[in-house]
Amino acid sequence: MFRRSLVAALSAIALSLPITALAQSTVTEVNGVKFDNEITLRGNKLLLNGAGTRYKFVVKVYAAGLYVPAKISTPEAAWDTKTPRAFKVVMLRDIDAKELGKLFTDGMQKNATREEFGKAIPGTLKLADLFAAKKKLVAGDSFFIEWVPGVGTSVVINGKPEFEPVKEPEFFSSLMKIWFGTSPADYQLKDALLAAPK
């Protein structure tokens, strides 16, 4: 009798709790942008390691999230090319695509060694051509930078692959150093991406 009463009492408490308290969320929201906590990339399960916002002064430029096979906390692990990785960016304001491409190239040059950047040049030229052709990215546009060992780096804009994968791992490493290098695009964003939420 006591057990039946206890079960009934616990059930009543559970029913009174908000749904979010009963079920773990499957997304993480940053400035209105929803990042899935888990994605599949070419058959590989990747987890959202962290997500945050890139600010330029006080203006929100984009939200970004890092996906890895297992949670990480160091910058070096972010550009490790032994396992798949993905980096998602969602624009929070309109931006000239050429300007964004230049910011990417400058960020790569600032953070990569001369040798590493030299090996990344074929991919960097492809990226420059892509942004030159795009003209503009508007608020809500998204792109993924995806790395798969044996396949290379792919760039997917609004769900559409933009060029053949770039094989050189240095290209992916150089790209990731834009956000995780010693001179990152945004130090607070770097910390948020490496926060490894549960």
Image: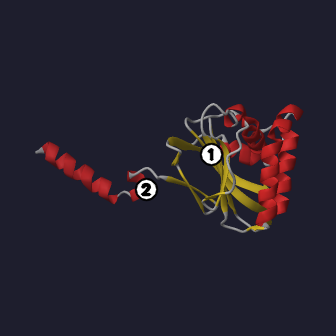
Q: Is residue 172 visible?
A: yes
> Which residue is identified by label 2?
20
Quarter holding the N terminus is: top left
> What is the secondary structure assignment of the residue under circle 2?
helix
Q: Residue at x 60, y 60 (%)?
A: 159
Task: Please rate how many residues cluster around mark 1, counting C-alpha atoms within 10 Å: few if below 14, some from 14 to 19, many from 20.
Answer: many
Quarter of the image for residue 101 reads bottom right
Q: Residue at x 70, y 64 (%)?
A: 92
Of residue 54 and residue 163, the one placed in the foreground of this image is 163
Of residue 98 and residue 91, the one placed in the foreground of this image is 98
Residue type highlighted by circle 2:
Thr
Residue 142 screen position, x and y as percent: 65, 60
Of residue 55 and residue 141, the one placed in the foreground of this image is 141
Q: Residue at x 72, y 41 (%)?
A: 172
Residue 161 screen position, x and y as percent: 64, 56
Please count the marks in the image.
2
The image shows residue 100, relative to residue 37, as above or below, that is below
Q: First in sequence, mark 1 or 2: give its number.
A: 2
Residue 171 screen position, x and y as percent: 76, 40
> Which residue is identified by label 1?
86
> What is the secondary structure assignment of the residue under circle 1?
strand
Quarter of the image for residue 118 reads top right
Residue type highlighted by circle 1:
Ala
